Amino acid sequence: MDSVAPTRGPEEESSRLDRLEQELTKLKAGLEKESRGVAGWAKRWGAVLALVVAIFAVPRGVLDVYHIFWSRPLTELVPGKTVEMGFDPTRKSVSFTLGIGVENAGTKDDFVSDWGAIAQNISAQPPRTVQFSSNDIQCTSEAGKIIKPPYPLHTSTSIQIFCTLESDTDPFKQSGTYEIEMSVSGANNQKKTVSYCFDLGDKLLTEVIGSTARESKRIMKNPNCE
């Protein structure tokens, strides 16, 4: 079994610095009494230089250990204020496009590794649930570029993505209040979720799903059910 070096606490590191500084003072004092020969001068100042390097290496070492053991991503999702509902009469499908703000406020890069969603009519009894896998969802950047996992999220970076969920029309033909919960998985399978709640009335459903052409409607979120 490999041995593990003991971890030094802050007090021990401070004591170590004090000892190094004391040793440096002794070496500098001894230098004045040392022979003025080139060999003696080089030997003494070589030791001094090694001590200086050791002193300044201590904070860097502590910092490196911190980054190795405590550095981590901190990715958060922020929902947009609207949902865009679309209808494709050729495919006989309905779609919902969600705007999502994504920010990594951590100290380590993150990656979008997967996503999924659940939609349900929470007005129905019992609620009817529709599952969306990553294959049912297409996400794009603000520039319209398709995002495919793994997608990097660098530290101190904020981006906006647009994810479109597509389904057949049957689960969305009934009016009521609907909720879509979108989940995004990052590095180490850490999952973040964001919810969208909105109303689909009879008039809206007739205009969209009852159309013979492509339709698109922007729907305001319902703040009362979140």
Image (cartoon, rainbow, N blue to C red):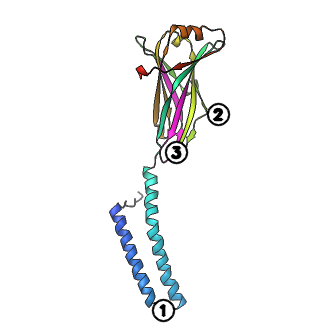
The residue where tag 3 is placed is 156
Q: Position of residue 88 (x, y in %)?
A: 63, 15
Of callouts 3 and 1, the N-terminal one: 1
Marks 3 and 1 in Cβ contact (< 8 Å): no
Where residue 150 sits, quadrant-wise, is top right
> Disc 1 marks which amino acid?
Ser
- The residue pinned by badge 2 equals 143
Is 1 situated above or below 34?
above
Residue depicted at x 44% and y 70%: 55
What stretch of residues is rendered in magenta? 98-119
Q: Nearer the viewer, residue 5 or 149?
A: 149
Q: Callout 3, which amino acid?
A: Ser
Question: 10 Å neighbourhood of mark 1: few (<14), some, or many (≥20)?
Answer: few
Judge by depth and name the residue closer to the eye, 5 or 185: 185
Gap between marks 1 and 2 measured at Cα:
72 Å
Q: Residue 98 is drawn in which quadrant?
A: top right
Q: Measured from the top left, where is residue 87 in percent x and y?
A: 61, 15
Q: Is residue 186 above or below residue 181?
A: below
| Vertical position of residue 172 compared to residue 7: above or below | above
- Element type where label 2 sits in the image: loop
Q: Does residue 24 show up magenta in the picture?
A: no
Q: Residues within 10 Å of mark 3 (few under 14, many from 20)?
A: some
State the CA–CA distance, disc 3 to disc 1. 56 Å
Q: Quadrant of the C terminus?
A: top left
The amino acid at mark 2 is: Ala
**Residue assigned mark 1:** 35
